[in-house]
Image: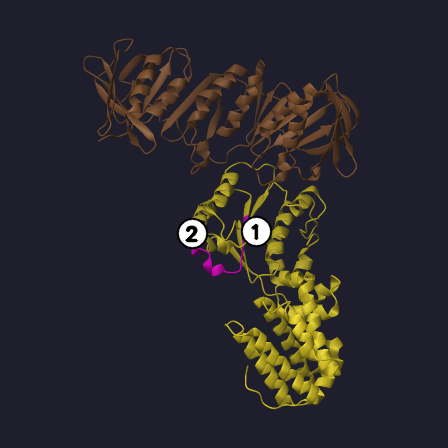
Amino acid sequence: MNFSILTEVLLNNLLIAQKALSTRTPAPYLQGIKLEVYPKKIVMITSNSDISIKLSIKDESLEVQSTGDILIPGKFFVDIVRKLDSEKIKLSTIENNVLRIEAGNSDVTLNLLNVEDYPELEFVLNDNPIKLDSKVMKSIIRQTTFATSAIENRPILTGVNIRVEGEKLVAIATDSFRLSQKVIDIPKNFENMNVVIPGRSLDELFKILELNLDEILIHLDHKSILFEYGNVLFQSRLLDGNFPETSRLIPVEFPIIIKFNKHDLFEAIDRASLLSQKDGSTSIVKLQLRSDSQVEITSNSPEIGKVIEELFPLEKAIGIPIKIAFSSKYFMDALKTFNSDDVYVKFTGEIRPFVIEGDEDPGLIQLILPVRTE
Amino acid sequence: MNNTTFESLSTYQSHVARILQNSFKYNKLAHAYIFEGPKGTKRFDTAVFFAKALLCSSPDADHNPCGICHNCKRIDHDTHPNVFIVTRDGEQIKKKQMKDLINEFSKASVENGPRVYIIDEAERLNQESANTLLKTMEEPGADIYQIMVTDQINSLLKTIVSRAQVIHFKPIDKDLIQADLLKNKVPTLFAQAIPEYTNNYDEATQISKDQDLLDLITFVKDTFDSFANKSGSAILDFKEKKDTFIKDSTRVDFVLSMMILFQKDVMTYKLRHLDQIIFKDQEDIFKKLSTRMSQKWIEDILDMMLGLKLRLKYNINVQFAFDKLLLTLERGYYYGLSSRTNPI
């Protein structure tokens, strides 16, 4: 194997590829970057077994002398290429599985890993990918992954459930105390699907989406999900098992609806949470709709002090007075996902889950379970 | 063990080979196995072989893995993403290791095909890890196979044992170990001695590579040789050699075991059970020694040695005990003095 290419081109691709580079795995072969060199292109593959990235690099500056596959120790290679100051870089294998890196005045040799040990990663493309605006994809990730479970007792809840149902694509995440659901419209020519993607994979995808290309293609299959983004193929393993049925969790009718300014509500809860009772690690605040249609957000911990925040709903609240307690963190997490300035908080009862929605966020529902006090 | 087949396995563990091969043949694989038996009975090797047989991309008609495809090679290198081998971390298998494992199996496989996890020394699962594992055993995933390797099946949770197929591994026949050692170019003397000391296949291989231990065998042989030929003084030689092993109780035990083997051979020769002699090549020594002393004396010495072997476990003065043993041997074999001595 022997080729040369612009250092910048190689580095830019390496920086994407290294996102899937494994750091703490017991398997040393996953700490490598696999390079496949073909006559007209090079392919770069990294994987930490949960996510796998494949980059096809075609560039005018690419000159291939000879082809071949190698497995390069990832971290060292990235660090070396990052620090090179010459415009072009030449890579070649010399005897005994050693890579030679020539760039300007630098001449580096690097011991390679055994390419035979690398897993046979299958990147599954299908003929009919779902095309999304990459901004939409980003917002789906931002609005759902935070609600996945951090505890691995029920592994399935650490993932985001993605469903294709007719003309809708639904993304749902829940840790069984809150639920976040985003529905977007898609054209109606896709097979129905129901998969669960690990939340962490989506967080990594989010970082790659910073490249700000226009669109992203989703190749969805029952066994795998692959995102095609420019020259990047990003594949994630799926979680095995059935995601809980959540459709019945979301109430249909809301007798009590209060409209707030998102910013004011956030600030009020944030302040109240300072002196709130700690239930384990979560802090509990109370929201009360008074009979005079004013809203009071309170927290009280007898040994420290008490906060009362008065809030004026933007419109006259609908429904009867109510008093409900919830985790301030969950509420603030949920509020952060909204683009709208105004949000509706909808209640069905004091010990029933409540829902937050916003005018400018169609398809987005944040559901939170209240906490029983007393 | 790169080219194990069911056939080669059956020379060591015939019924294990039969059970496993039949499960493949009739497609009746259990999702969990316990490979149970004493150490050194090829349990772990068989587990890896099983994984290969499952994952090999071109097994032969008898379900033997080819050993040369990408899957087989990577299992040999321990780099296959579908094969997980859990070994103890410190003294125990920790809960975190089980959690990682469960986490891994909550996701779809990295490569298509079955997945295997092998837990070595499963008796080292602590209560917590065992319970964590149990949960997954209750709902085995599709195409996931589990093998637990243990020599103390009774210390596994009953609920785990009841969910797995138990396969018993028998101690390996001495002759097989000897044949294997000879095949690996271990000199005859050692190949004859080692299987008498241990029937643990792994330990035997290990000893055959430990030059210090091999030297000790040679030393014991030389000692008996010098008794037989009355050349030099065994006691003086012994004094020189002693320092190399006297501090290490397992080595002391090793030397004594070897001496017992030689003494036994003298006895066997005396009784003319020539086919039962272990060190056949040294028959000359036994011939000379056995004619010099009475059967009763030889038996007494053997008694003395076996007694000493037992007492080694207590705080006795090993040095004196060996001196006395050597002295008695030399007086007998050298000078024909068979005065009854007090036990050591």
Question: Which x, y percent locates residue A181?
Answer: 42, 22
Q: Residue at x 61, y 24 (%)?
A: A16
Q: What chain is tagged by disc 2?
A: B
User: Residue A214 is drawn in which quadrant?
Assistant: top right
Label 1 to label 2: alpha-carbon separation: 31 Å
As drawn, the residue found furthest toward the top would be A315
Query: Tag 2: residue type?
Result: Gln
Q: Within the image, what quadrant is residue A301 found in?
A: top left
Please determine if labels 1 and 2 lie on a single subunit. Answer: yes
Name the quarter where the C terminus of chain A is drawn: top left
The N terminus of chain A - image quarter: top right
Mark 2 crowdedness (10 Å alpha carbons): few <14, some 14-19, many ≥20:
some
**Front one among A51 and A15:** A15
Give the residue at mark 2: B127
Q: Magenta residues, as a range?
A: B146-159
- The residue indicated by pointer 1 is B28
Q: Nearer the viewer, mark 1 or mark 2?
A: 2
Q: Magenta includes B157?
A: yes
Chain A: what color?
brown
Q: Colour of chain B?
A: yellow
Residue B298: x, y in percent? 63, 85
User: Would you identify the image quadrant in which residue A117 lies?
Assistant: top right
Q: Which mark is residue A369?
A: none
Q: Residues within 10 Å of mark 1 (few under 14, many from 20)?
A: few
- Using the rendered image of the protein, determine whether residue B69 is visible from the camera's viewpoint: yes
Of A48 and A309, the residue lying toward us: A309
Q: Label 1's element?
A: loop
